[in-house]
Amino acid sequence: MAQVTEILSCNRMIKKAHKLDHGGNLMMAALPHGDLQILITFTGSHRNERTDFKVDQSLQYMANTLSIELDGKLYYLCAEGDKVFLQKLVAKQPNDKKYMFEVKYVNDSSNYMSIKSINTGKYLASDEDGKAFMEEVNPSSLVDGQPIDRQTWFYLHRMETVKRERESTLHSCYCDGASLDYSVLYQTQVEAC
């Protein structure tokens, strides 16, 4: 059983309610796969392998890492300057600060959270078009140490993945004296939310 997390942009949720827009508000790995670095956007509209993130705690920095597995390769959320992207790594738990994030509720009565880079001190943000970036927040824009700008607010929806199964079915077809054999591979997944 593994826990995965969908990360939703508060800013995109508000904007979508007021204007018709293509795309959703889930943080997702943008294509192409296979690169050392992959951009992220907040345009995912349904759960799939590009939106299922894993949040782990790093005891060394008392912070979190956010990772995703794509095509059998592990990518970690990475902040450098104003840029944020997924970095392909071999390590199961990186030690570099650029992969460490402080994830905290924005206030006591909210379900929204901020995601602050330990490396840069900047906050993960999403504009109304779903572009992801790191934003510096002035101390005057903080209340109780948390940003008030909704571009830096996110909802983390945690789900337990209970079971994954892969099944393959072999089919044969005979038509006009010719035989064709083919296999269909499919995967089913059961969740507990």
Image (cartoon, helix red, strand yellow):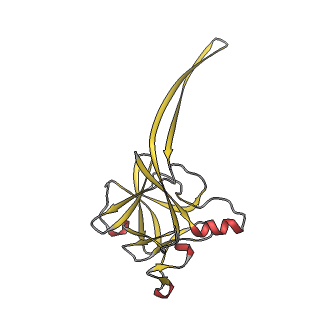
Residue at 45% across / 82% down in the picture? 144
Q: Position of residue 119 (x, y in %)?
A: 36, 73
**Image x and y of residue 27, in percent:** 53, 60
Q: Nearer the viewer, residue 33 or 162?
A: 162
- Image quadrant holding the N terminus, namely top left
Front position in the image: 109 or 17: 109
Q: Is residue 84 visible?
A: yes
Residue 175 located left or right of residue 31? right
Task: In the displayed orientation, state which residue is furthest to the left.
Answer: 60
Q: Percent position (x, y) of residue 114?
A: 47, 71
Figure label count: 0
Q: Residue furthest front?
A: 109
Picture residue at 66% right of the left edge, 69% below the top: 15
Most distant residue in the bottom direction? 140
Q: Is residue 94 left or right of residue 33?
A: left
106 vs 40: above or below: below
Identify which residue, 173 or 160, lies in the foreground.
160
The x and y percentages for residue 92 are 32, 54
Identify which residue is drawn at 55% across, 78% down.
149
Residue furthest toward the top? 177
Using the rendered image of the protein, determine whether residue 129 is visible from the camera's viewpoint. Answer: no
Looking at the image, residue 97 lies above or below residue 47 = below
